[in-house]
Amino acid sequence: MTKALRKKEGFEGQKLIVLPRKIVADFLVVDLITQPAYITDIGYYPKALHHYMERPSGISQHILIYCVEGRGWVNQGGSRQEIGPSDFVLIPAGTPHRYGADPEDPWTIYWIHFGGETASYIVDLIRQGKPRLAYDDHRFKLFEDIYTNLEKGYSSDTLRYVNMIFYHFLSSLLYEDKFIPTGSRSETDAIDKVIGLMQQKSHGLLSLGEMADFADLSTSHFSSVFRKRTGHSPVEYFNHLKIQKACQYLLFTPMTVKEVAQTLGVSDPYYFSRMFTKWMGYSPTEYREVNRTA
């Protein structure tokens, strides 16, 4: 195995935990909770002057580096990426790489090494998005929670807990628009606005053209963007919200199926029943019988 080349990794205020490889092998890779994605190493390097790492053969874990201050660079696959505040980089397992801090303005970084059965897929998804994040205290509280608990040792409960938090941390990179509270966003994008409109209009009708107009996009472009963002067509998504409301009415009110359909703007109760059955696996009447509490 090629030895990693490194320079100065002693930085005032640094944090570092490397999980024992026996813990990784005996628990993390076999436990049903942790095996999808689990942390093997975690650290924080503040103002890491002269920080440099070179691994000509890569390592067996994926590497996440998130810069909060200063500057640095990462070279992987022959491509160099300049890193500054709010930038992050993911280095897939087995990828030869080098990285280091800027000598004039050294970076402050959070970093994590991780593996798992679904980790490669998660890395691929995240790398398809933008390599930049808005600063958010909630994300760093997740990191601190993970680190603080790992400092206490490696009980089964601790390992499950921190890696479930880690999943949430990864989701904050992949779905930043959902992670950051709405009130702290600079603006809500067109798709979020349309979903808000759908929620307001869930008791009535809303055409594809009306949704596209509200988003100020052509119908075809809106449909394409909406499906890419949500995984569903706009009309299908709107029906999901109607079904969500229908479930609430069936469980929390004495309304008949016909009354529920009419309340949701569906004039044909038979069409409503077919749509409900398609998505819920029960007819409206069966759903009420199976799920309604006394």
Image: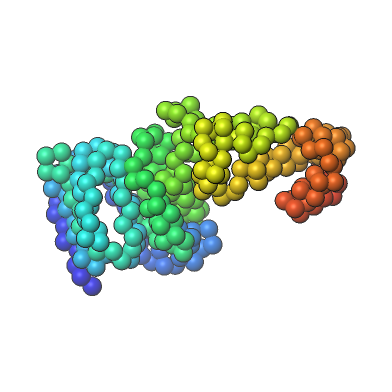
Q: Quadrant of residue 39?
A: bottom left
Can you see residue 162? no
Q: Quick check: 76 left or right of 6?
A: right
Q: Looking at the image, which residue is at 20% across and 49% down? A: 73
Where residue 195 appears, as percent x and y from the top left, is 59, 35
Where residue 129 appears, as percent x and y from the top left, is 39, 48
Q: 285 or 6, which is in the foreground?
A: 285
Q: Looking at the image, which residue is at 53% across and 33% down? A: 215
- The residue lying furthest to the left in this view is 104
Q: Looking at the image, which residue is at 41% across and 57% down? A: 124
Image quadrant in which the N terminus is located: bottom left
Q: 20 or 214, which is in the foreground?
A: 214
Can you see residue 91? yes
Q: Quick check: 154 left or right of 9?
A: right
Above or below for 211 versus 285: above
- The residue lying furthest to the bottom in this view is 1
Image quadrant in which the C terminus is located: top right
Where residue 291 appears, as percent x and y from the top left, is 79, 46
Above or below for 134 versus 38: above
